[in-house]
Image (cartoon, rainbow, N blue to C red):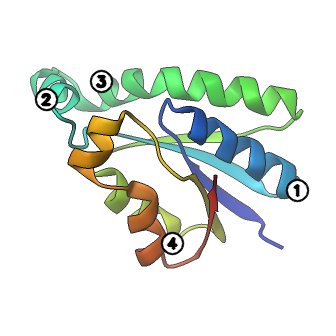
Amino acid sequence: MASKILVPMDDSEMAREALEYALEHFPDAECTILHVVGGPSPMWGEATGLALADDIGEATAELSEKVFSVAREVAEEYDTEIETKSRLGHPARAIINEAEEYDTVVIGTHGGTIAERLFVGNVAEQVFRRSPVSVVVVR
């Protein structure tokens, strides 16, 4: 059984469902939520905002807080503690790099808008194909 789980999250419903799945199916595992900011988007809005920020680390943390707030609410429903990490960069690459420290990655099938998925590609698919550890894709 996995003892350390990584749950990459954006602000999508599928990411929330992935977290719920992880908390239900791995109740004794340490669960870490990872939010990656600054990745490609159709109009490069987030990346541009980060480039103009005085403190990129602080800006990354601020952009992650909305996702972490939702994750904490879900964890509370399961009476579970979670850890949070935010990273700057391309989502798939950041998740794959972070995965080495965990037993399993639990990820939603997709997130964001249809335009973002077409432009950026499917992060879950990239993680599934290149992860150094087991990946559970929640649908």
Q: Is residue 10 left or right of residue 118?
A: right
- Residue type marked 4: Glu
Give the number of the mark in front: 2 or 4: 2
Residue at mark 3 to residue at mark 2: CA–CA distance = 18 Å
Quarter of the figure with residue 72? top right
Residue at mark 2 to residue at mark 1: CA–CA distance = 41 Å
Image mark for residue 28: 1
Indicate the secondary structure of the residue bearing disc 4. Answer: loop
Could you tell which of marks 2 and 1 lies nearer the N-terminus?
Answer: 1
Indicate the secondary structure of the residue bearing disc 2. Answer: loop
The residue under the point 68% across, 59% down is 5
The residue under the point 71% across, 50% down is 31
Q: Quadrant of the image for the N terminus? A: bottom right
Residue identifier under label 4: 100
The residue under the point 80% across, 58% down is 29
Could you tell which of marks 4 and 1 lies nearer the N-terminus?
Answer: 1
Indicate the secondary structure of the residue bearing disc 1. Answer: loop
